[in-house]
Image (tube, helix red, strand yellow):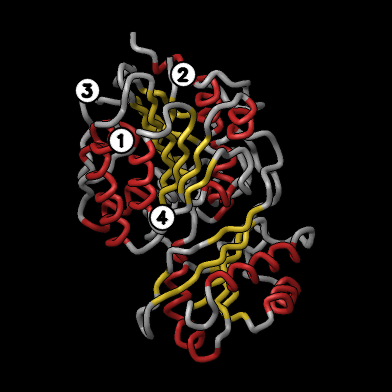
């Protein structure tokens, strides 16, 4: 019997283009394969042991003859390729709205509303990554006090402000007001408030990021678990992505490694239910992304060593982020699904799932909650033979 599920989602953890990737401009995208090629190979012995090498041919990652976990890959049927639709679909809700609201950058009418509410000029407002925007507009931001604005080309707009220009709490409140003003305007589903720190020429993201997101348009895994009186803990940006809905308690964190350590520390205090964790490891350049992913891999034994009978660990992603492509924005890709736990099956090939909602369906079945509207559980495949 499963009593506790630890669901770890790595942002941008892609393993190859989905069949419709060309419609999103992402034909040929493959985050992990291209990352490994760029750095001369990845050392991921613990993910390798779970079966990652069976999911994709990644330089440095072996295909184990007898993996200790079960393995497969997940597709997405939602329209979009960002964290919102990725986490929602994993939790049982399909997003069907047109994804490319900002395919040409932030439109002039939306920008005008944002500047009016924010109370100052916004600079940038094009499709880009945070690194590119800080490099291009960091000096102007510090000199003028204008907030940096960019989009992922889909349904997310991000704003960045140095803590010396505006205190993070005030900046977050302004971003909340922008998000409220744009609701119903054909505008973003998500506004990201990203505080900055560091000096000239060395600006960096501060740990106090806040995402303002519309509520999911359907019943999620968190909702049905909550209705079944299960404990639901959200670590990292989980609370923001679901507007706090369905969570017993939320734990925002400053980094992916901090989120991981929060998870490990929680195991002794949360005996049942779901621990849902977001891990932002692959948002920067190749060298930093490879280092972050390998550091995470080295930490995994600390988690595995604290598991007990009745625990189920699922490790997956929300979309791709092929850093070899222009913009370094999310890419439309399959993601791995790696599953382990004491006394569970080993070495089972779960195959390719059409929808990431299969994970949510597996979680609610494992924890004996009502079924979600979409997804097929693969819990039976995890039972030892």
Mark 3, Cα crowd under 10 Å, few <14 / some 14-19 / many 20+, is few
Rendered-image quadrant of the N terminus: top left
**Residue carrying label 2:** 379
Classify residue 346 as left or right of residue 283: left
Nearer the N terminus, badge 3 or badge 4?
3
**Residue carrying label 4:** 322
Residue 52 badge: 1
Q: Measured from the top left, where is residue 185 in percent x and y?
A: 78, 62
Q: Is residue 105 above or below residue 3?
A: below
Q: Quadrant of residue 61?
A: top left
Q: Is residue 303 above or below residue 167?
A: above
Closer to viewer: mark 4 or mark 2: 2
Q: Measured from the top left, where is residue 36 in percent x and y?
A: 27, 51
Classify residue 26 as left or right of residue 350: right
Nearer the N terminus, badge 4 or badge 1?
1
Discs 4, 1 touching: Cβ within 8 Å: no
Nearer the N terminus, badge 2 or badge 1?
1
Discs 2, 1 touching: Cβ within 8 Å: no
- Toward the viewer: 72 or 30? 72
Mark 2, Cα crowd under 10 Å, few <14 / some 14-19 / many 20+, is some
Closer to viewer: mark 4 or mark 1: 1
How far is the residue under mark 4 from the one under mark 1? 18 Å
């Amino acid at each position: 019997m499963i009593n506790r599920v630890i669901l770890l989602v790595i942002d941008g953890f892609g393993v190859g283009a989905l069949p419709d990737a060309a419609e999103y401009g992402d034909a040929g995208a493959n985050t992990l394969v291209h990352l490994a090629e760029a750095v001369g190979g990845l050392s991921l012995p613990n993910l390798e042991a779970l079966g990652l090498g069976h999911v994709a041919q990644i330089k440095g990652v072996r295909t184990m003859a007898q993996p200790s976990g079960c393995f497969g890959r997940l597709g997405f049927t939602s329209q979009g390729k960002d964290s919102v639709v990725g986490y929602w679909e994993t939790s049982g809700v399909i997003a069907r709205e047109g994804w490319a609201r900002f395919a040409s950058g932030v439109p002039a009418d939306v920008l005008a509303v944002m500047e009016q509410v924010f109370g100052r000029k916004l600079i940038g407002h094009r499709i880009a990554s945070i690194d590119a925007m800080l490099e291009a507009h960091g000096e102007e931001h510090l000199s003028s006090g204008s907030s940096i604005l960019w989009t992922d080309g889909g349904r997310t707009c991000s704003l960045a402000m140095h803590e010396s220009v505006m205190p993070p709490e005030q900046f977050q409140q302004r971003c909340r007001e922008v998000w409220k003003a744009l609701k119903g305007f054909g505008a973003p589903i998500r506004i990201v408030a990203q505080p900055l720190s560091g000096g000239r020429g060395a600006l960096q993201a501060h740990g106090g990021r806040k995402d303002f997101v519309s509520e999911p348009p359907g019943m999620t895994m968190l909702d049905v678990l909550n209705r079944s009186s299960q404990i639901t803990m959200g670590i990292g940006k989980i609370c923001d992505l679901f507007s706090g809905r369905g969570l017993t308690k939320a734990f925002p964190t400053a980094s992916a490694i901090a989120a991981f350590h929060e998870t490990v520390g929680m195991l002794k205090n949360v005996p049942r239910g779901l621990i849902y964790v977001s891990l932002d490891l692959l948002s920067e350049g190749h060298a930093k992304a490879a280092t972050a992913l390998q550091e995470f891999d080295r930490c995994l034994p600390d988690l595995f060593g604290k598991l007990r009978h009745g625990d189920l660990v699922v490790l997956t992603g929300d979309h791709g982020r092929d850093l070899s492509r222009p913009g370094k924005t999310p890419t439309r890709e399959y993601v791995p699904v790696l599953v382990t736990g004491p006394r569970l099956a080993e070495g089972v090939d779960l195959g390719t799932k059409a929808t990431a909602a299969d994970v949510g369906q597996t979680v609610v079945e494992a924890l004996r909650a009502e079924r979600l509207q979409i997804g097929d559980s693969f819990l039976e495949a995890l039972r030892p033979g």
